Image (cartoon, rainbow, N blue to C red):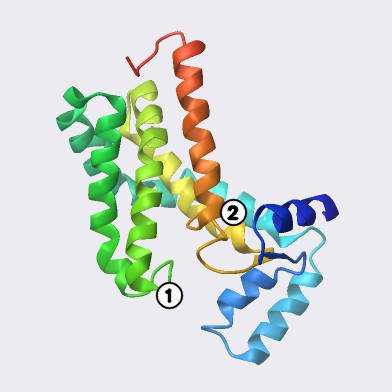
Amino acid sequence: MALGALGVSLLFPGVEYSPQMAGFFDQLSMVLPPEQLEEMRGQASAFPVHPLWIGLLQGMIAGITLNAAAAFGEELGWRGFLQKEFSHMGFWKSSAWIGAIWGIWHAPMILQGYNYPQHPVLGVGMMTVLTLLLPPLCSYVRLKAKSVIAAAVLHGTLNGTARLAVMVVTGNEWVIGVTGLAGFVVLVLMNVGLFVYDRSWAKEPIMG
């Protein structure tokens, strides 16, 4: 834990690590009264395992069931219809177009305070960065599995586990979590890894 806390502080100044789930309770403080928060803190401290692991298990289960079913409606559009319509552009260009449209589609929700409640207007740009980084991963899974369902499972699992990234850290919403700078760095690295893998080791490359 100490090593993880040091890494967070060095990579992202201003972000504080808290094994007591300060980030999780900071989010709830906007919707729950103080007495209920204190009760939840007491319940969390009594768990035999850290609530982070419980949340991870719940998110993984939801990702292949309820969340996948909910995400399937979106994925029919992104990885179903648009993936087919833009296939002539090639993998990366089609992913970029899908990501841009995906970002615009989210704009009304972001302007209402979703994901970036303190900066809803600038949050539209941040969300668009996120939706530009996600499509290559989702599209690759969809093409390799030859099924939109696989992309829906990935999408649903991300939705089910995304909030875990801010359970044990506090900081600026631009930096922490999947929707902040920390998440963008991870997604960039994943895209680079995907490119290298497909070009160097994949038996059937799809990024020709």
Amino acid of disc 2: Gln
Q: Mark 2 points at which residue?
A: 58
Q: How far apart are marks 1 and 2 (CA)?
A: 25 Å
Task: Assess whether mark 2 and mark 1 are in contact (beta carbons under 8 angstroms).
Answer: no
Residue 133, percent from left and from top: 40, 42
Q: Check residue 180 in the rendering and tell me which mark sits there, or answer none.
A: none
Q: Is mark 2 on a helix, strand or loop?
A: helix
Above/below status of 65 relative to 2:
above
Q: Quadrant of the N terminus?
A: bottom right
Q: Which of marks 1 and 2 is nearer the N terminus?
A: 2
Amino acid of disc 1: Pro
Q: Mark 1 points at which residue?
A: 117
Q: Can residue 161 be seen in this view?
A: no
State the residue in front, 159 or 69. Answer: 159
The residue that appears at 47% across and 43% down in the rendered structure is 64
Q: Quadrant of residue 189?
A: top right
Local crowd size for mark 2, using a 10 Å CA cut-off: few (<14), some (14–19), many (≥20): some
Q: Can residue 33 be seen in this view?
A: yes
